[in-house]
Every structure is written in C-alpha cells, then in structure tokens.
Amino acid sequence: MSASISASPPIMSSPVTPSASPETPTASAVPDESTMDHGSPDSIHVMVNKLNPLDPADYAPEDLHVPDVPASKASMELRDEAAGAAEDLFAAAADEGVDLTLVSAYRSYGYQQGTYGGWVERYGQAEADRISARPGFSEHQTGLAMDVGAADGACTLEQCFGDTPEGAWVAEHAAEHGWIIRYPDGAEDVTGYSPEPWHLRYVGTEAAAGVVRSGGVLETAWGFDPAPDYGPDSAP
C-alpha cells in the first residue's frame, strides 16, 4: 500500500468505496465463501491484513510476469492471473478515453522492509502503520495488488486521486475486471489503513462483485474480524 501524506512518498504500498456496482450476479454466480482458501498465499482469495500475515512471511509467488500496461517504471510484476486482469482493466479504461498507469505492483519481503522502514524513519511507527504494511503483512507481496495512477501524474498516491476522472473510473469499473479498491474511505477502523483509492487488489470477478454487494470492505465481505491494529506478536 502507499500513503497520501506526501505528493512524492518513498516507494511503498494500499481505496474509496466503488461509486457504482457491477450488475448483481445471479445466485449461481455468487461465489461460495466457504470454498474460498483465505490462508494459502498461492490463493487469489488469500486474506492479508494486520491480523493475517503471509505464511511464510517471506513468501514469493512463482508465476510473476510483467503486465503489458503503461507503467511509471520498467519490470513491475504481478501474478499471471492478476497481470491478465490488469491488462483487461487498462484496456477497458483506454477504450473510454481514460489513461491509467501502473505505479507499483509486486514487492518482495526485502523490498517491503525498505519501504516500511522508510516511512517509519520519516513519520514514526504509529503513522507508518496507517499508511504502509509491515513486511510479511503486505498485499503487494502476494503479487495480487497494484497501485494505479493517472497517466498525467495527477494526484499520484494521494487521496485526491479518487476525485480525478481516472480515480472515478477505477472506482466504478474495477470490480468488473476482478479488482476491488482495498482500503475504502471510512473503513480504516476495519482495514487498519487510511483510504487509498489507488490501491487495487485482485480477487476475481465473482468475488469482486460479492465484495461490492457487501459494501466494499474485504474483511466484512469475507467474514473476517476488523484488523485496525497489529497483534501483540507482530513486532516490526
């Protein structure tokens, strides 16, 4: 996830509740929550938050590749299925005259150590924990999360991205392509992070529709307890 405190934050990672939902799926299209694998880091439905770290903590996906989308820097990777969904999302946006750019994607455990440490040094641990995930607790480490921005750079990694045409389009259409805005406005007491309208998490189209129908917060939609803070055994 990333932060919105600075227009030029150090590289790091996590959105606004979608303004419009995809068409409500039929009963047969609604995913069976009981069949989702929320524990395995290889599952596209893995839950990663302050109370549910990756196991192992230094997990690295084996199916990473670079999606064919405009990007702010070269060689940013996503897991195979998420990369394809990112390409679909960017293409759909371009078809409607909305130019997106990929700002951040997969981050290794070691990379996230540097990212999180940079925020701690800059703002202190308490504030860092609102805007960046500790290593082993980052959705970016799954290869299923990406930060997006406007091609012109407007409000990159800032909360005002949600007010741009690009941010509004993403909020309305991300779920149609299997993505959700992971850290919505007004959900910090559940997600543990300040709003990040640029941070998208891939869960698949059916699951994304279910999250939107449930109010847009992943923990609530998947029946997880709120995770506003880290547990006592998760010291950085």
Image (spheres, helix red, strand yellow):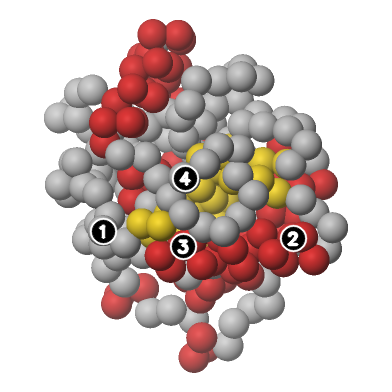
Which residue in the structure is indicated by mark 3?
Answer: 82
| Residue at the image position 54 percent from the left and 50 percent from the top | 200
Return the x and y of residue 5 as percentages of the image width and height. 60, 19
* First of labels 4, 2 by sequence position: 4
Quadrant showing the C terminus: top left
Q: CA distance from mark 4 to mark 1?
A: 15 Å
Mark sitting earlier along the chain (4/1): 1
Q: Which amino acid type is marked by label 3?
A: Ala
Which disc is residue 93 wearing?
Answer: 2
Q: Residue at x 47, y 45 (%)?
A: 76
Mark 2 vs 1: CB contact within 8 A: no
Number of other residues with Cα within 10 Å of mark 1, as a class: few under 14, some 14 to 19, many 20 or more: few
Position of residue 190 in the picture relative to residue 69 (left or right): left
- CA distance separating discs 3 and 2: 16 Å
Gap between marks 4 and 2, in whole Å?
20 Å
The picture quadrant where one finds residue 41 is bottom left
What secondary structure is found at the residue carrying circle 4?
Answer: loop
Foreground disc of the pair 4, 2: 4
Which residue is the site of mark 1? 62
Q: Disc number at residue 76?
A: 4
Whichever of labels 1 and 3 marks the residue nearer the N terminus, that label is 1
Q: Secondary structure at mark 2?
A: helix
